[in-house]
Amino acid sequence: MKMLTILLQASSAPVSGSAAQGGAGTSSAMFWIMIIAMFVILWLFMIRPQRKQQKELENFRKSLKKGDKVVTVGGIYGVIDEINEKSALIKVDGDVKLRVDKNSLVKDYSDTQPK
């Protein structure tokens, strides 16, 4: 137990001279470089693709027209029958029509997927 205490005190003892100052500056610079690199990687792999996807979805919602096949975020498939500024009337089955918020519509990918 005494040996462990001596080793811990020896490792935490300050080092005198210019070697200690050079080491502290290098470790501080490396710390900031690693933090900046982490934020760059986070931006490249998470934030940028998410913004791109949001812009594509926004453009899709602006370009909706009668007859487009859509899916709601709740999983309801339908065809647009009427489109307004904030809502859309979708034809679900036969004479069944639902008025949904335009922000809840996403593209129907069922026709584009290979079978």
Image: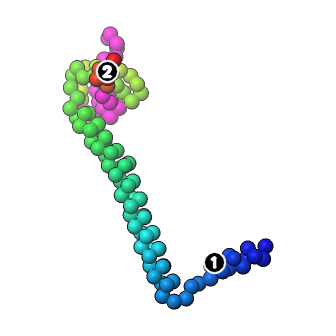
Q: Position of residue 99 (x, y in %)?
A: 33, 24
Where does label 1 land, which residue?
A: 11
Report the quarter where the N terminus lies: bottom right
Q: Residue furthest top?
A: 94
Mostly what secondary structure, the magenta segment?
strand
User: What is the C-alpha distance between the residues marked 1 and 2?
Assistant: 64 Å
Residue 99, can we see it?
no
SS of the residue under disc 1: helix
Q: Name the residue: 47% across, 74% down.
A: 27
Q: Residues within 10 Å of mark 2 (few under 14, many from 20)?
A: few
Residue 12, can we see it?
yes
Q: How many marks?
A: 2
Q: Quadrant of residue 12?
A: bottom right
Question: Type of residue at label 1?
Answer: Ser
The residue range painted magenta reads 85-108
Q: Nearer the viewer, mark 1 or mark 2?
A: 1
Question: Type of residue at label 2?
Answer: Pro
Q: Position of residue 69 (x, y in %)?
A: 28, 22
SS of the residue under disc 2: loop
Q: Position of residue 62 (x, y in %)?
A: 22, 35
Where does label 2 land, which residue?
A: 114
Q: Is residue 102 magenta?
A: yes
Q: Name the residue: 45% across, 82% down.
A: 22
Q: Position of residue 24 (x, y in %)?
A: 48, 79
